[in-house]
Image: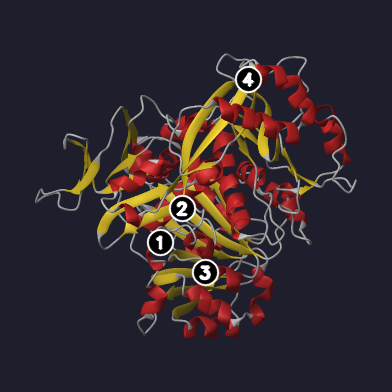
């Protein structure tokens, strides 16, 4: 181990010469040695060999950066079979290709974040036209692979506007590699501010290009406005050990922060995240709305944590979810591409036949027509507490429970004038850090000293749940509609329990359960699954069902609030709250968005989607 930590092994030991061009032309791996992160931009993913080669070089380098970002574009994604077939010609890459294939699904238009190596290798792939996709990113690449596996065939007539969009993603000193030596490419790069040099290459090209971004002019300030300098990881306090707080803590800890998580409860997930079980299902809409796109990206992020860190069928289950539609809302886009069927499709006879016992008869509308439904293939159930616990196990996190935070103040110490002090009700300092993240749900607003900066509305929700009996008519999978029903999840005693919920009481922050709510929930069950409701009727009437209630919160536009609250007035104070009833879908994504903004990283989603969640949007609406 001492030798590995001291000397870099030659890259040629791990890679065949034909796959060295891009790495060597960009000065890798030497250029990334000792860096906190390295950001590669690739034009054209193809079958992924450039990404796999870069990943392998990172994996085998003892001086690798903590994080490796690869941002790539692709107009027509390859199939899983094509990815694996290409990697099969390079046996050393095949194990990595198998991991890639496991996440290679549901690639609709826009950006998708795939994570590897416990979140230290991040692949952000944009599906669509490269020129337009680059406008939806805001980062500075350290290395650029101009040719993807397919793009090199089309570089002879490269769009100069594409090169300009690419240059906007570069910093002074960014190195670029290309297998094309055409005049149009060389002239286009020079016009965009690159210093270009021809080099000897491997057959069949014979020559290749190396370039460095070093324009003779100073790039426009407007183009640089969104390229913030990354923060150096130091100390961080996250207030709240629920889904939002745990997700932010995990994302920051993976980037080197020493994170203290404070919570007033005796253990993690003591508030709204204590829900016995929750449903995972994407939002759908005919126009593929902002919420629909955000929910898919968020669900992908949550799914990967569950898949790699939780116990299947114990902590979560990828069962699929049927969404019954009792009105015209919630449909799919008319021309839903094939990639979308990983997420959702119109339900067919097989799904309804499986529901017969729970419904009691075929679902009919008032007009006698079959009611439509959507089958969410990427759906299931999960235990929020288990997800929170998994996130808090990330190295670098220290949870502290039983600490009620009352207020914050800037440090008065001369040596720590950039830090925040976290105070209890007696004005005792219980923690101090350069960065504080408010993730305490509705209570976050009261910690800002100016609650109007964080307009939050409490939403109380109650669910009913009980033990599954053999005589109960249960659907074979969770069902969503007016309320949601989970037919069987493993409870704390190892048995199987059902769950139905939830109420939605605005401006109510009382977390005590109410018997009247149980009857309201039963009414929803009667509409959603009539036959199941009949078999559970005695449990509701006899008071045998258990109840749980929690308080969530929402923002004025019903979207999460993430990021710095006010960089000028409140530097070092961030927020992650207002996840509403979609905390299971949004929390992990929001944690990554917060970390990306602090570290000038590539965004996991399109810029316009990310901006819809940023806390800064609240100031613009004043």
Residue at which label 2 appears: 555
Are the residues tagged 2 and 1 within 8 Å (C-beta)? yes
Question: Of tags 1 and 3, which is closer to the observer?
Answer: 1
Are the residues tagged 4 and 2 within 8 Å (C-beta)? no
Taking the view exactly as shown, the residue that stands out farthest to the right is: 368
Across the whole image, how many numbered discs are drawn on residues?
Answer: 4
Question: Of tags 4 and 3, which is closer to the observer?
Answer: 4
Which label number is shown at residue 348? none
Distance from the alpha carbon under mark 4 to that under mark 2 = 32 Å
Q: Earlier in the sequence, mark 4 or mark 2?
A: 4
Q: Earlier in the sequence, mark 1 or mark 3?
A: 3
In the rendered view, would you say 9 is above or below 479? below
Q: Residue at x 86, y 42 (%)?
A: 364
SS of the residue under disc 4:
strand
Distance from the alpha carbon under mark 2 to that under mark 1 = 9 Å
Based on the displayed image, in which of its 4 quarters is residue 516 positioned? Answer: top right
Residue at which label 4 appears: 466
Q: Earlier in the sequence, mark 4 or mark 3?
A: 3
How busy is the neighbourhood of tag 3: few (under 14 within 10 Å), some, or many (20 plus)? many
Which label number is shown at residue 177? 3
Residue 531 in the image, given as x and y percentages of width and height: 80, 27
Is residue 204 visible from the viewing direction of this image?
A: no
SS of the residue under disc 1:
helix
Distance from the alpha carbon under mark 1 to that under mark 3 = 42 Å
Which label number is shown at residue 618? 1
Distance from the alpha carbon under mark 3 to that under mark 2 = 45 Å
How busy is the neighbourhood of tag 2: few (under 14 within 10 Å), some, or many (20 plus)? some
Q: Nearer the viewer, residue 541 or 383?
A: 541
Residue 554 in the image, given as x and y percentages of width and height: 48, 49
Taking the view exactly as shown, the residue that stands out farthest to the left is: 414
SS of the residue under disc 3:
strand
How busy is the neighbourhood of tag 4: few (under 14 within 10 Å), some, or many (20 plus)? some
């Amino acid at each position: 181990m001492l030798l590995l930590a001291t000397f870099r092994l030659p890259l040629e030991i791990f890679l065949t010469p034909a796959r060295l061009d891009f790495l060597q032309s960009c000065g890798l791996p030497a250029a990334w040695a000792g860096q906190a992160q390295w950001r590669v931009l690739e034009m054209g993913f193809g079958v992924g060999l450039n990404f796999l080669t870069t990943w392998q070089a990172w994996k085998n380098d003892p001086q690798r950066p903590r994080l490796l970002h690869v941002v790539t574009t692709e107009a027509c994604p390859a199939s899983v079979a094509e990815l694996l077939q290409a990697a099969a010609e390079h046996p050393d890459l095949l194990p990595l290709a198998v991991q890639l294939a496991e996440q290679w699904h549901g690639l609709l238009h826009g950006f998708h974040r795939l994570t590897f190596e416990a979140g230290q290798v991040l692949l952000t792939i944009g599906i669509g036209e490269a020129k337009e996709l680059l406008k939806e990113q805001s980062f500075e690449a350290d290395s650029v692979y101009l040719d993807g596996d397919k793009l090199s065939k089309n570089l002879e007539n490269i769009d100069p506007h594409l090169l300009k969009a690419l240059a906007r993603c570069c910093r002074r000193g960014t190195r670029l590699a290309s297998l094309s030596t055409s005049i149009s490419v060389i002239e286009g790069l020079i016009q965009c501010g690159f210093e270009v040099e021809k080099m000897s290459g491997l057959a069949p090209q014979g020559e290749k290009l190396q370039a460095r971004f070093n324009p003779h002019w100073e790039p426009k300030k407007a183009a640089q406005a969104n390229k913030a300098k990354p923060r150096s990881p130091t100390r961080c306090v996250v207030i709240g050990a629920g889904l939002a707080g745990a997700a932010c803590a995990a994302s920051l800890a993976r980037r080197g922060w020493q994170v203290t998580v404070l919570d007033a409860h005796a253990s993690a997930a003591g508030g709204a995240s204590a829900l016995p079980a929750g449903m995972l299902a994407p939002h759908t809409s005919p126009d593929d709305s902002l919420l629909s796109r955000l929910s898919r990206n968020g669900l992908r992020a949550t799914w990967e944590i569950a898949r790699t860190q939780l116990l299947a069928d114990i902590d979560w289950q990828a069962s699929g979810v049927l969404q019954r539609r009792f009105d015209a809302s919630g449909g799919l886009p008319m021309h839903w591409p094939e990639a979308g069927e990983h997420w959702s499709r119109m339900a067919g006879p097989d799904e309804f036949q499986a529901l017969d016992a729970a419904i009691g008869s075929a679902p009919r509308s008032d007009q006698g027509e079959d009611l439509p439904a959507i089958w969410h293939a990427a759906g299931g159930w999960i235990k929020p507490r288990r997800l929170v616990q998994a996130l808090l196990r990330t190295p670098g996190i220290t949870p502290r429970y039983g600490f009620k935070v009352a207020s914050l103040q800037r440090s008065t110490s001369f040596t720590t004038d950039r830090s925040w002090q976290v105070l209890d009700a007696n004005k005792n300092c219980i923690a101090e850090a350069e960065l504080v993240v408010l993730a305490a749900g509705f209570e976050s607003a009261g910690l800002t000293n100016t609650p109007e900066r964080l307009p939050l509305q409490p939403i109380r929700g109650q669910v009913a749940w009980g033990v599954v009996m053999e005589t109960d008519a249960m659907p074979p999978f969770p069902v969503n509609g007016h309320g949601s029903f989970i037919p069987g999840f493993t409870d704390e005693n190892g048995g199987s329990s059902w769950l139905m919920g939830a109420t939605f009481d605005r401006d109510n922050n009382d977390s005590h359960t109410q018997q009247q709510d149980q009857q309201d929930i039963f009414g929803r069950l009667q509409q959603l699954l009539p036959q199941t409701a009949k078999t559970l009727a005695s449990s509701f009437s006899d008071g045998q069902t258990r109840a749980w209630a929690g308080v969530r919160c929402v923002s004025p536009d019903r979207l999460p609030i993430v990021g710095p609250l006010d960089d000028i007035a409140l530097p070092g104070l961030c927020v992650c709250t207002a996840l509403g009833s979609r905390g299971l879908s949004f929390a992990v994504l929001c944690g990554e968005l917060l970390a990306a903004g602090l570290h000038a990283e590539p965004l996991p989603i399109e810029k316009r989607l990310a901006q819809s969640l940023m806390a800064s949007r609240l100031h613009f609406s004043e």
